[in-house]
Amino acid sequence: MAYETGSLDATLSAAAGDDPVMLGELRHAFIHSVAKQVDLLERSRCDGNWRIAAMRLKGLAASFHSGELIVLAEEAIAAAPGEPTVVRALKRFVDGFSAD
């Protein structure tokens, strides 16, 4: 699963303008933040920690206009702590974004 190219790229490009270095830094900051929350989700064993990490993911997704990540975050919010299918889907998102 590759990351979506529409709204997310438009948001990053609008923020970076014509500066390719800034664009790279914004992309890195976004995926680093997502990966950090996915790691916290993976290590969460209680409802509260799981929900906080999932809500932070949804906030990141909304801030960067990433529809795909919003859907994944909502799946995490609805899931039980440690749900492996949710964690795997989020890791695929991170890997797909990082591979670009």
Image: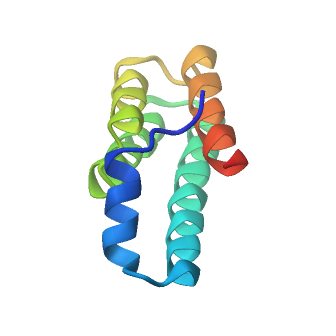
Q: Quadrant of residue 83?
A: top right
Q: Quadrant of residue 39?
A: top right
Q: Eyeballing the image, is 74 above or below 53?
A: above
Instruction: Look at 43% across and 26% down and name the residue there.
Output: 76
Q: Eyeballing the image, is 39 above or below 77?
A: below
Colouring scheme applied when the structure was drawn = rainbow
Q: Is 93 on the left or on the right of 72, as rendered?
A: right
Q: Is 93 on the left or on the right of 9, as rendered?
A: right
Instruction: Look at 34% across and 43% down and name the residue there.
Output: 58
Instruction: Look at 32% across and 61% down and name the residue there.
Output: 11
Q: Eyeballing the image, is 27 above or below 37?
A: below
* Residue 26 x/y as whole percent: 50, 71
Instruction: Look at 38% across and 68% down and name the residue there.
Output: 13
Q: Is 83 on the left or on the right of 100, as rendered?
A: left
What count of labels does the image hold? Answer: 0
The residue furthest front is: 18
Q: Return the residue nearer the eye: 66 or 78.
A: 66
